Image (cartoon, helix red, strand yellow):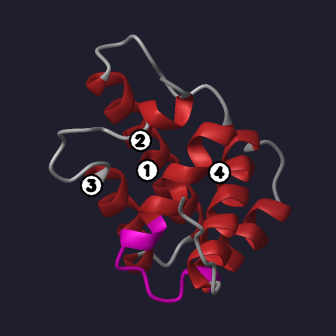
């Protein structure tokens, strides 16, 4: 079973719903610090769901594991103006030091927004 297969939580009725709901909270915030924290909490919820589902035998190891899940969450989140929220968080992070993990999460969030908004077509075998 590959890494990508392990990210599909088989019999879970609404996979990653807690992470999706956390991302949706961004739209109710007006402070970039809180938005960045919300993005971090969404990531923590993704990690928890994967670890819980696999009973601690598998966890997200890299941002390559996180990106497809971020795309999934952004695709299913009710988040209007996601690109604007990204820009607000990016402007904030440009002005401060640290926040290395949050910068990576924001990069994934940006990729997810672009992917969801694109006219991506999928070739299935």
Residue drawn at (42%, 80%) of the image:
79
- Could you say where residue 110 lies in the image, as x and y percent from the top left? 68, 68
Give x and y (percent) for residue 104: 73, 48
Residue 60 horizontal side relative to residue 45, left or right: right
Name the residue: 20% across, 53% down.
14
Callout 4–callout 1 Cβ contact below 8 Å: no
Residue 17: give its label. 3
Determine contact: label 4, label 3, CB under 8 Å.
no
Residues at marks 1 and 2 touching, judged by CB atoms closer than 8 Å: yes
| Residue 1 belongs to magenta span | no
Residue 33 sits in quarter: bottom right
Measured in 3D between alpha carbons, the distance from the residue under mark 3 to the one under mark 2, in whole angstroms, is: 9 Å
Which circle's residue, 3 or 1, is located before the other in the chain? 3
Picture layout, residue 39 above or below residue 99: below
Instruction: Name the residue tied to disc 1.
Output: 42
Disc number at residue 105?
4
The one nearer the camera, 125 or 70, is 125
Residue 115 % position (x, y): 64, 73
Spatial CA distance of label 1 from label 2 is: 6 Å
**Residue identifier under label 2:** 46
CA gap, disc 4 and disc 3: 18 Å
User: Residue drawn at (35%, 60%), measured in percent from left and top?
Assistant: 20
- Name the front one of labels 1 and 2: 2
Instruction: Give the SS element for disc 4.
Output: helix
């Amino acid at each position: 079973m590959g890494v990508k297969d392990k990210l599909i939580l088989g019999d879970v009725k609404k996979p990653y719903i807690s992470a999706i709901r956390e991302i949706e909270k961004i739209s109710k915030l007006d402070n970039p610090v809180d938005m960045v924290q919300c993005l971090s909490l969404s990531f923590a919820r993704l990690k928890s769901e994967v670890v819980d589902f696999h009973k601690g035998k598998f966890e997200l190891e890299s941002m390559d594991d996180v990106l497809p899940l971020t795309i999934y969450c952004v695709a299913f989140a009710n988040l209007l103006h996601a690109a604007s929220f990204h820009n607000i968080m990016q402007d904030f992070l440009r002005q401060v030091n640290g926040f290395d993990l949050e910068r990576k999460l924001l990069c994934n969030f940006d990729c997810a927004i672009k992917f969801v908004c694109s006219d991506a077509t999928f070739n299935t075998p």
